[in-house]
Image (spheres, helix red, strand yellow):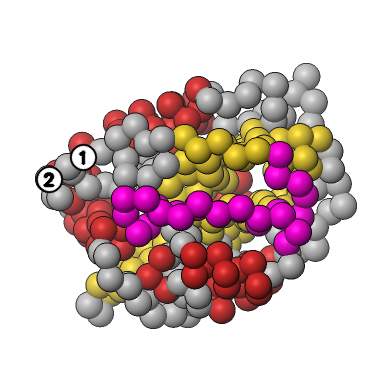
């Protein structure tokens, strides 16, 4: 019962974060109950460090986000909930030669961005099929060869009528539909990563759908059940692992983790991956 109530609360505050049209100020909770920060090791020269970060549109321009990103030294950063202010702040505050952003459309939490040290070949915007947010298929010329990355922001657990209690149970299939639709747009010839705010934990249906097709979550692999999202509710802070970096069999994850930084309700997550021959 406690688990159910907590999950219902997750849905409620996720709705607040995603639907509110006024800025949502999230206090810094970097010491609010997480275990000791995971150290970020030096990257092996043969690996590629990829980060995903839902920066939270409500704290747009917060310089702590750039500091958190820089602390892990990622080569490619996939971003969710960006807007023009976030674009200006991160492009100016970080030295990435290649970057692209798309502004939010219907909801202020719907923007996306990418920062890369390597050329961005193309970005295909994938329309939503039930959730409020579009996705991206990003193709990048990485040192070991061209790769593709799905940047995802799946539907929050909210019903069409705005109920988070109903939505917790009824939106699970929608997230499966979203990820299945987006995966159909993948180039089967390219090694693939799927990253972002999945709005569900590792046992969710969208995550299971991807796992059944050979994808592995590097965050669960190296960070266990450590939470990537937190929100204060009165005297309590609820926490769940809603952000993931999934890789297909043409990659091998070397390490990964969660950065304790920034003032978003989400934490930056990162993984080092290497290209491998599946045979």
- Mark on residue 161? 2
Residue placed under numbered mark 1 in the picture: 169
Furthest-right residue in view? 45
Q: Does 110 lie within the magenta span?
A: yes
Asked if residue 136 lies in the magenta stretch, the reply is no
Would residue 48 be seen by someone viewing this image from the given angle? yes
Q: Residues within 10 Å of mark 2 (few under 14, many from 20)?
A: few
Q: Quadrant of residue 51?
A: bottom right
Vertically, is 146 above or below 99?
above
- Residue 71, label in figure: none
Q: Is residue 263 left or right of residue 41?
A: left
Q: Quadrant of residue 148?
A: top right
Is residue 274 toward the left or the right of residue 102 in the image?
Answer: right
Residue shown at the point (50%, 22%) measured from the top left: 184
Q: Is residue 37 visible?
A: no
Residue at 32 percent across and 73 percent down: it is: 23
Q: Which residues are magenta?
A: 96-121
Relative image position of residue 29 (x, y in whole percent): 43, 77
- Vertical comparison of 219 with 144: above or below: below
């Amino acid at each position: 019962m406690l688990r159910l109530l907590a999950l219902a609360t997750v849905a409620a505050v996720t709705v607040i974060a995603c639907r509110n049209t006024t800025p949502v100020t999230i206090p810094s909770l970097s010491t609010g109950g997480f275990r000791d920060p995971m150290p970020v090791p030096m990257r092996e020269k043969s690996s590629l460090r990829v980060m995903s970060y839902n920066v939270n549109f409500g704290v747009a321009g917060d310089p702590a986000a750039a500091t958190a990103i820089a602390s892990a030294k990622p080569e490619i950063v996939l971003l969710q909930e960006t807007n023009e202010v976030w674009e200006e702040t991160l492009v100016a505050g970080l030295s990435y030669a290649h970057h692209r952003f798309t502004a939010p459309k219907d909801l202020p939490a719907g923007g996306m961005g990418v920062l890369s040290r390597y050329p961005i070949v193309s970005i295909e915007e994938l329309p939503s099929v039930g959730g409020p947010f579009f996705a991206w298929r990003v193709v990048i010329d990485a040192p070991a060869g061209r790769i593709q990355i799905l940047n995802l922001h799946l539907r929050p657990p909210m019903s069409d009528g705005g109920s988070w209690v109903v939505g917790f149970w009824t939106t699970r299939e929608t997230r499966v539909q979203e990820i299945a639709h987006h995966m159909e747009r993948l180039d089967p010839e390219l090694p693939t990563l799927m990253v972002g705010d999945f709005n569900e934990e590792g046992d969710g249906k969208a995550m299971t759908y991807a796992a059944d097709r050979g994808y592995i979550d590097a965050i669960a692999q190296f960070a266990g059940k450590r939470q990537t999202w937190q929100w204060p509710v009165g005297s309590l802070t609820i926490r769940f692992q809603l952000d993931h970096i999934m890789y297909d069999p043409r990659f091998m994850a070397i390490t990964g983790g969660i950065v304790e930084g920034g003032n978003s309700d989400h934490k930056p997550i990162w993984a080092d991956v290497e290209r491998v021959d599946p045979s």
